[in-house]
């Protein structure tokens, strides 16, 4: 009896994301894996200072997986860099509703609140601007 394996090729970008998955935060499913593709592009846009493009790409990730906390976190960070504090805070809140312990969302939310208050009063904030590494 001749048995053949039935294999389905995986896109190179998906394979690389799977390889880079952190043990503490493994990719849970195929949709999350696919959502990381536009999120990876959002990260590059962010690093290039293209914050609106980063937001648009993170929104693309949400079209793939609507409950994708990393995309909300990324949008919150990019909105903050644009000085759109209400949108930054609401996106950090959305990330935390999905995952109450998601990364730096709590501290970034604090940064957004302090920055919004500082923008209204003209004072400097004590919290350093966070970055996406």
Image (spheres, helix red, strand yellow):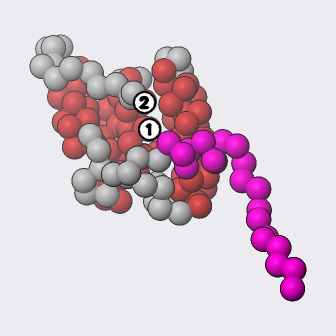
Tag 2 residue: 78
Q: Is any part of residue 63 visible from this angle?
A: no
In the figure, is residue 66 to the left or right of 104? right
Circle 1 — which element? helix
| Residue pictured at 76% horizontal, 56% vertical | 9
The relative height of residue 6 versus residue 54 in the rendered view (above or below) is below
In the foreground, 13 or 42: 13
Q: As drawn, which residue projects farthest toward the bottom?
A: 1
Residue 73 in which image quadrant:
top left
Give the magenta range.
1-20
Q: Position of residue 33 (x, y in %)?
A: 56, 53
Q: Secondary structure at mark 2?
A: helix
> Which one is in front, 11 or 126?
11
User: Could you tell me which residue is drawn at 72 percent across and 48 percent down?
Assistant: 11
The percent coordinates of residue 125 (x first, y second) are 15, 19
Whether residue 53 sits left or right of residue 12 in the image: it is left
Tell me whether the residue at label 1 lies in contact with that at label 2, contact meaning CB atoms closer than 8 angstroms: yes
**Quadrant of the image for the C terminus?**
top left
The magenta stretch spans residue 4: yes
Image coords of residue 36 (percent x, y): 55, 46
State whether residue 30 is above or below residue 107: below
**Residue 43 at what x, y percent from top left?**
50, 31
The one of 9 and 122 positioned closer to us in this rendering: 9
The CA distance from mark 1 to mark 2 is 5 Å
Q: Which mark is residue 63?
A: none
Q: Is residue 58 magenta?
A: no
Q: Would you say residue 73 is visible in this rendering?
A: yes
How many neighbours does mark 2 have within 10 angstroms: few (below 14), some (14-19), or many (20 or more)?
many
Q: Residue at x 35, y 59 (%)?
A: 98
- Which quarter of the figure has residue 16? top right
Residue occupying the point 48% across, 55% down: 27
The residue to which callout 1 is attached is 75
């Amino acid at each position: 009896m001749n048995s053949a394996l039935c294999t389905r090729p995986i896109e190179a970008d998906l394979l690389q994301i799977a390889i880079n998955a952190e043990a503490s935060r493994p990719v849970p499913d195929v949709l999350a894996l696919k959502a990381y593709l536009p999120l990876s592009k959002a990260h590059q846009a962010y690093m290039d200072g293209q914050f609106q493009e980063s937001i648009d790409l993170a929104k693309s990730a949400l079209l793939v997986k609507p409950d994708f906390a990393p995309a909300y976190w990324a949008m919150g960070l990019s909105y903050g860099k644009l000085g759109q504090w209400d949108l930054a805070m609401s996106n950090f809140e959305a990330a935390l509703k999905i995952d109450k312990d998601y990364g730096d969302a709590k501290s970034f939310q604090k940064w957004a609140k302090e920055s919004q208050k500082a923008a209204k009063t003209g004072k400097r904030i004590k919290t350093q601007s966070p970055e996406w590494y």
